[in-house]
Amino acid sequence: MKTKFTFILLFLALTAYAQQQERVAIIQTLDDRDSIGISDLAYLTDKLRETAVNVLPKQQYGVMTTESIVAFLGSQERAQKECRESSCLAELGRKVNADYVAQGRIGRFNKNLTIKVELYDSKKGNLVGSFTSDSKDIVGLRNAIDEKAPDLFKKMLATPSVASVPPPQQVQYQQQPSANMEQRAKVQWYIDNGVEKHKEEIKREASSLSYIDKTDLYNENKKSNLGYFALNFVPGFGLGSYIQGDRSSGIKLSIIDVIGWGLIPAGIGAYNAAFSFCDKGDDGHYTDDCHAPDIAMYSFGILSGIVLATSRVMGWIYTSNYADKYNKSLDEALNSSNNVSYSIEPLIVPRDGTPAVGLVFNLRY
């Protein structure tokens, strides 16, 4: 089971002064007659939001996420209530600190579904534009949004925007190297130079890394035995184990393969030597009842096959055990199985009617 603790640290700050983007809120589409399902309403809302993102210049306009809107209104339940009960869409836009606000409403006319989308300037309370459409099904409503919503949002571009005025001085910030990446690089160096040799150093340096960082390092460095086993299979002689770093297993496999392949010329020698036990006929050729050479050759051939097959089985076992031992040692050094993680995320919430910037600290275990 995972438990999540959330700590919110608020830092009061007036964002209007520093804000260079105008905020656009796409409020959840409403259906006064419950003509379509909740998932369909969410889909139409997402289509409106997607259109706004694609049409509006990102340097001038920022489209708010559903989470940001809910954060301003306090909760998901309150957000739904506000969306339904707000008598003025512009007023709702001001509550979520948006410069522009848009919302769709689903209704019925005759037997058709209808949609009406309105876009307001929240500060002035002016209607920037709207469109209506009807269709027999939700697919037609989606097509209406694809066709008409781009022109609706383009009307915002025709109005002067404070965000479009360039600031008097552009300050360039140089991104500094991440301390977390530097720490990961240090841990990676110890791993590359031997997990067992530097196990304590890896534990010490990895203690300041997050669970995600440690998991990434483990997944990047864990070893599989498949490639090494393939080299133990062909050409054999423990080559895969040598490359894997398991020298003792490589020596054992080399000895076994030398014996296995050595039995083949030994079988040929035994085959030739076995003729000394056979009788020759009057014509100087060996008689048909001379089976000793064949028995000798087949016996050595079967024995060679058994030895070489045993070497391949052992090659799998050795590489698999070595990889498991390495991965276990790496996991212990990184402590990556410790299922604790944290994250810090930005958050904007209203405080006494004034936007406040905050951070959300999530701790999971």
Image: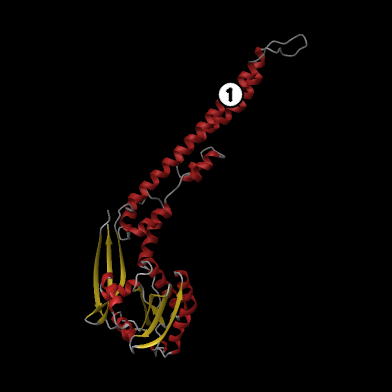
Up/down of 236 relative to 292, above or below: below
Left or right, residue 7 beside residue 52? left
In the image as oriented, which residue stretches furthest toward the front?
110
Up/down of 131 relative to 34, above or below: below
Q: Secondary structure at mark 1?
A: helix
In the image as oriented, which residue stretches furthest toward the left?
352
Q: Give the quadrant of residue 79.
A: bottom left
The foreground one among 340 and 32 is 32
Residue 114 appears at what percent x and percent y? Answer: 42, 75
Q: Give the quadrant of residue 261.
A: top right
Q: Which residue is mark 1?
A: 300
Residue 58 appears at what percent x and percent y? Answer: 44, 79
The foreground one among 343 and 150 is 150
Residue 13 appears at what percent x and percent y? Answer: 27, 81
Placement of the C terminus among the 4 image quadrants: bottom left
The foreground one among 309 and 326 is 309
Left or right, residue 338 beside residue 151? left
User: What residue is shown at x 43% (from left), y 80% (from top)?
Assistant: 132
The way the protein has been coloured in the rendering is secondary structure
Residue 165 appears at what percent x and percent y? Answer: 41, 89
In the image as oriented, which residue stretches furthest toward the right?
283
For residue 192, say whether it is visible.
no
Up/down of 26 relative to 205, above or below: below
Amino acid type assigned to the residue bearing label 1 in the image? Phe
